[in-house]
Amino acid sequence: MPIVTVKMAKGRPVTKKRKLAKAITDIVARELDVKPEWVTVLIEEYDRSNWATGGQLHSDKFGKGFGKKGSGK
């Protein structure tokens, strides 16, 4: 029973997470030759104020909207 964990910043719509879970499930099932219902995908979301790189919080380092299309960052 494969378990895949995805860690990412909060803020993406549930429709995107559904597509991601389906895509990961399909690839893992195909590549490991297991049934899709045996694949578990865990999505862990973090507030940017609870995530730091290089000693600096992402909320301070990158600002609101970082990583979203059209944010210019």
Image (spheres, rainbow, N blue to C red):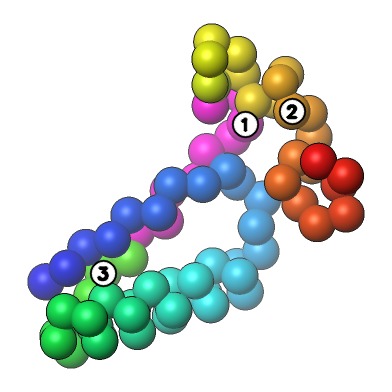
Q: Could you tell me if residue 38 is visible in this image?
A: no
Pinpoint residue 39: horizontal percent, then vertical percent: 23, 75
Pinpoint residue 32: horizontal percent, then vertical percent: 16, 79
Mark 2 vs mark 1: which is more N-terminal?
1
The kind of secondary structure element at disc 2 is loop
At label 2, the amino acid type is Phe
Instruction: Read off the residue under disc 3.
Output: 40
Q: In which quarter of the image is the C terminus?
A: top right
Q: Which label lies toward us, 2 or 1?
A: 2
The tag on residue 48 is 1
At label 3, the amino acid type is Thr
Q: In the rendered view, would you say 8 is above or below 2? A: above
Mark 3 vs mark 1: which is more N-terminal?
3
The residue depicted at 33 percent of the width and 65 percent of the height is: 41
Distance between the Cα atoms at labels 3 and 1? 25 Å
Q: In the rendered view, would you say 7 is above or below 53? A: below
The tag on residue 62 is 2
The kind of secondary structure element at disc 1 is helix
Pinpoint residue 21: horizontal percent, then vertical percent: 43, 72
**Magenta residue span:** 42-51
Q: Do tag 2 and tag 1 residues touch (Cβ < 8 Å)?
A: yes
Pinpoint residue 3: horizontal percent, then vertical percent: 21, 63
Q: In the rendered view, would you say 23 is above or below 11? A: below
Q: In the rendered view, would you say 4 is above or below 52? A: below
Badge 1: residue crowd in 10 Å (few <14, some 14–19, many ≥20): many
The residue depicted at 66 percent of the width and 50 percent of the height is: 11
The residue depicted at 54 percent of the width and 21 percent of the height is: 52
